[in-house]
Image: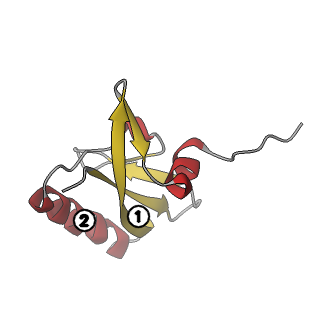
Amino acid sequence: MARMVITANRLRDGAVVWRSAAGNWSPNITTAAIHATGEQLTAGLAAALADEKSGRVIGVHEVEIETRGGQILPTRLRERVRADGPTVSFA
């Protein structure tokens, strides 16, 4: 199985957040828990979906990642933009 992290959007302000091993939601992907097995991912998604049901977050889903130099990098461009912010600057 590919390594995965769990992401969602915070319900109160729409910010992109990542689920940590402690079950907290952070706007920083570096705090995300990495799930290396299907069992870990299933348990993490179940807990994240409970947070969604309680109204903390919305749009829970898993994201495939790779690590380079200790950094967590989503493999898909869409998720990299979600993790790093816009790809353009406004000057």
Q: Position of residue 63 (x, y in %)?
A: 37, 57
Disc 2: which residue: 45
Badge 1 crowding class, 10 Å Cα cut-off, few under 14, some 14 to 19, many 20 or more, is: some
Q: How many marks?
A: 2
Residue at 52% from the left image edge and 46% from the top image edge: 83
Q: Dot 1 lies on which element?
A: loop
Badge 2 crowding class, 10 Å Cα cut-off, few under 14, some 14 to 19, many 20 or more, is: some
Name the amino acid type tagged 2.
Answer: Leu
Considering every residue shown, the one lying at the far bottom of the view is 53
Considering every residue shown, the one lying at the far left of the view is 39
Quadrant containing the C terminus in the rendered view: top right
Name the amino acid type tagged 1.
Answer: Arg
Residue at 51% from the left image edge and 65% from the top image edge: 11
Along the viewing direction, whichever of 20 and 39 lies nearer the viewer: 39
Considering every residue shown, the one lying at the far top of the view is 69
Disc 1: which residue: 56
